[in-house]
């Protein structure tokens, strides 16, 4: 378990170096659809796909009633369009079949484990998507792990990088939704700008003092 004081040191360093945490969508359905669209693409393409989807279909109900081909055409800027179209339509239909309306607020009345299990039972919804919806739209203490976060946490020495990084990270972090939210967004930004996949810029990294890889780089070991 990471101590709260150590987590706060990391958050302070990241805030100081990278600036304020950006605002993100909190509406549960919007968050769910955006996160499905974000798989294997950039934020710019995700946002283009979402804008195109909402321009073509008047509402989430219209998307749920739509043809996969039409939804796929609308979300094509995000790539993997048929797969994403089928997943979006399936999860919207599943919500409507349960609630009689496109309303995810029932997740807020479930325990975190129940809500997670419900989301994970939807086609195309994995741990990252489910945990983003629960953390950002319902304030639940589940930490989403994407490829940037997996890489940074592995280099820091917080997780092993083998097995399930999602499980490791969630066992490691204090169950604090506000800190998890900030850490999620800031680690992604660090992974995009400094701790990149092909090259880690340890010399300018705000976390170098407490990083396994950064420590070896500073010691001239690797
Ligand atoms: S010190 Fe280097 S390896 Fe560690 S988090 Fe920063 S950039 Fe990544």
Image (spheres, rainbow, N blue to C red):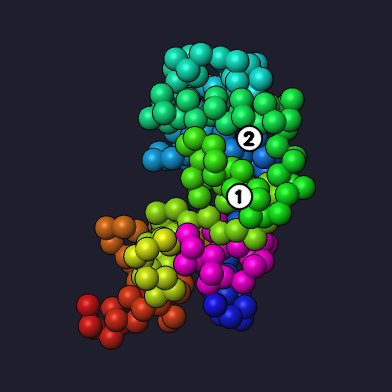
* Residue at figure coordinates x 67%, y 62% from the top left: 178
Q: Is residue 14 visible?
A: no
Tell which circle, 2 or 1, labels the residue nearer the N-terminal end.
2
Location of mark 2 (residue)? 30
The percent position of residue 42, horizontal first and vertical second, equals: 42, 40
Q: CA distance from mark 2 to mark 1?
A: 17 Å
Q: Position of residue 61 (x, y in %)?
A: 66, 20
Numbered marks: total? 2
* Residue 166 visible somewhere in the drawing: yes
Q: Is residue 107 above or below residue 85?
A: below
Judging from the image, what secondary structure is the residue with disc 1 in? helix
Q: Assess whether residue 183 is covered by the magenta stretch.
A: yes
Task: Name which residue lies at 54% across and 37% down.
Answer: 122
Quarter the N terminus occupies? bottom right
Q: Looking at the picture, how far across and down is residue 28, in whole percent?
A: 67, 39
In the visual, does 41 lie left or right of 111? left
Respond yes or no on whether mark 2 lies under 8 Å from ligand 1.
Answer: no
Check if mark 2's residue and mark 1's residue have beta carbons within 8 Å.
no
Which residue is painted at 41% across and 61% down in the image? Answer: 164
Q: Quadrant of residue 121?
A: top right
What residue does disc 1 label? 116
Q: Residue at x 47, y 59 (%)?
A: 166
């Amino acid at each position: 378990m990471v101590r709260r004081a150590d987590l706060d040191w990391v958050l302070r360093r990241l805030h100081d170096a990278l600036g304020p945490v950006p605002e993100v969508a909190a509406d549960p359905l919007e968050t769910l659809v955006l996160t499905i669209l974000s798989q294997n693409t950039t934020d710019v393409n995700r946002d283009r796909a979402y804008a195109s989807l909402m321009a073509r279909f008047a509402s989430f109900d219209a998307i749920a009633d739509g043809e996969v081909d039409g939804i796929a055409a609308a979300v094509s800027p995000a790539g993997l369009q048929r797969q994403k179209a089928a997943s979006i339509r399936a999860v919207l239909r599943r919500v409507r079949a349960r609630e009689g309306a496109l309303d995810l607020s029932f997740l807020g009345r479930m325990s975190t484990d129940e809500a997670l299990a419900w989301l994970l039972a939807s086609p195309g919804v994995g741990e990252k998507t489910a945990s983003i919806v629960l953390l950002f739209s319902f304030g639940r203490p589940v930490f989403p792990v994407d490829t940037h976060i997996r890489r940074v946490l592995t280099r820091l020495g917080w997780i092993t990088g083998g097995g399930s990084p999602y499980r490791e990270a969630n066992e490691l972090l204090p169950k604090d939704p506000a800190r998890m939210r900030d850490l999620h967004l800031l680690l992604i930004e660090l992974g995009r700008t400094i701790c990149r996949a092909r090259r880690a810029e340890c010399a300018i990294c705000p976390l170098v003092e407490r990083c396994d890889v950064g420590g070896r780089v500073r010691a001239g070991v690797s």
